[in-house]
Image (cartoon, rainbow, N blue to C red):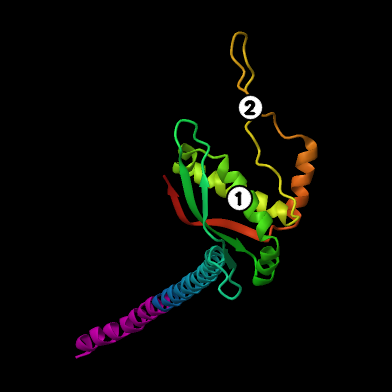
């Protein structure tokens, strides 16, 4: 019986060694889990912070885009004033045949007060417009560019009639001619420094006459 009892004692002595090894494995797994949880928490925090910064930057970009978009829209709280003129019927400057134009013009100004002031100068304004139209040919007025140039000329003339300084548009600089080439008469040199200074002064005081619109345009 003593021989049978010996194996029992030996088997019991091996149990504490296995339990100690198992305990070390559990501790190692626990430490690994803690590290994984800590790393995951840090990654989640960094992602959340990056998302918050991106959202903030996105809101700022959206606000800037909205501001730029709204700046292109007309100010509905302070709309411009439109001053319609009686239609113009004038003979054109065509030499080969008799041509005439019937033109309806509406002037856009900054406010109603200035529109009332323009009405006091209307005879002089209409005279200037008639003089401009009378020097145009049908070919010039039938072209879109010609209509745009006409609108610009009317705006400048009406502004000067109201005592507003407006510069002439810049003309292209004449190209340097080589020997034997013909010089074109309508070429104009570059603006002088004196005109450039006057242009800066005009920029400092916005023109209350904003645009010239055509409500009717017939050339026959």
Q: Predominant secondary structure in magenta? A: helix
Q: Earlier in the sequence, mark 2 or mark 1?
A: 1
Residue that lies at the very extreme toward the bottom in this rendered image: 1
In the rendering, which numbered label is found on residue 187? 2
Above-or-below relation of 177 to 79: above
Image x and y of residue 148, in percent: 53, 47
Q: Is residue 17 left or right of residue 137?
A: left
Image point 46% across, 73% down: which residue?
A: 44
- Give the label, 2 or 1, closer to the camera: 1
Residue that lies at the very extreme toward the top in this rendered image: 180
Above-or-below relation of 112 to 105: below
Image point 75% across, 51% down: which residue?
A: 165
Determine whether the residue tagged by mark 1 lies in a helix, strand or loop.
Answer: helix
Residue that lies at the very extreme toward the front in this rendered image: 98
Determine whether the residue tagged by mark 2 lies in a helix, strand or loop.
Answer: loop
Query: Does 41 appear in magenta?
Result: no
Circle 2/circle 1 CB separation < 8 Å: no
Image quadrant where one finds the N terminus: bottom left
Question: Which residues are drawn in magenta?
Answer: 1-28
Image x and y of residue 114, in percent: 69, 67
3D distance between C-alphas at marks 2 and 1:
25 Å
Within the image, what quadrant is residue 10 found in?
A: bottom left
Query: Does 2 appear in magenta?
Result: yes
Q: Is residue 31 left or right of residue 64?
A: left
Crowding at label 1, few (<14), some or many (≥20) Cα neighbours within 10 Å?
A: some
Q: Which residue is mark 1?
A: 129
């Amino acid at each position: 019986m003593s021989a049978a009892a010996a194996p029992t004692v030996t088997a019991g002595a091996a149990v504490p060694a296995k339990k100690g090894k198992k305990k070390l494995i559990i501790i190692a797994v626990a430490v690994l889990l803690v590290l994984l949880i800590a790393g995951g928490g840090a990654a989640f925090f960094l992602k959340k912070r990056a998302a918050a910064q991106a959202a903030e930057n996105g809101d700022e970009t959206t606000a800037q885009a909205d501001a730029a978009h709204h700046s292109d829209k007309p100010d509905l709280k302070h709309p411009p004033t439109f001053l319609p003129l009686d239609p113009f019927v004038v003979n054109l400057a065509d030499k080969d045949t008799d041509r005439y134009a019937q033109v309806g013009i509406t002037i856009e100004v900054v406010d109603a007060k200035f529109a009332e002031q323009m009405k006091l100068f209307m005879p002089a304004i209409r005279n200037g417009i008639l003089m401009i139209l009378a020097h145009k040919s049908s070919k010039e007025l039938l072209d879109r560019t010609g209509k745009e140039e006409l609108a610009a000329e009317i705006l400048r003339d009406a502004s000067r009639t109201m005592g507003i300084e407006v510069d002439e548009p810049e003309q292209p600089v004449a190209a340097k001619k080589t020997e034997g080439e013909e010089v074109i008469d309508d070429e104009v040199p570059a603006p002088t420094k004196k005109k450039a200074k006057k242009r800066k002064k005009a920029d400092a005081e916005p023109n209350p006459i904003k645009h010239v619109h055509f409500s009717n345009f017939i050339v026959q």
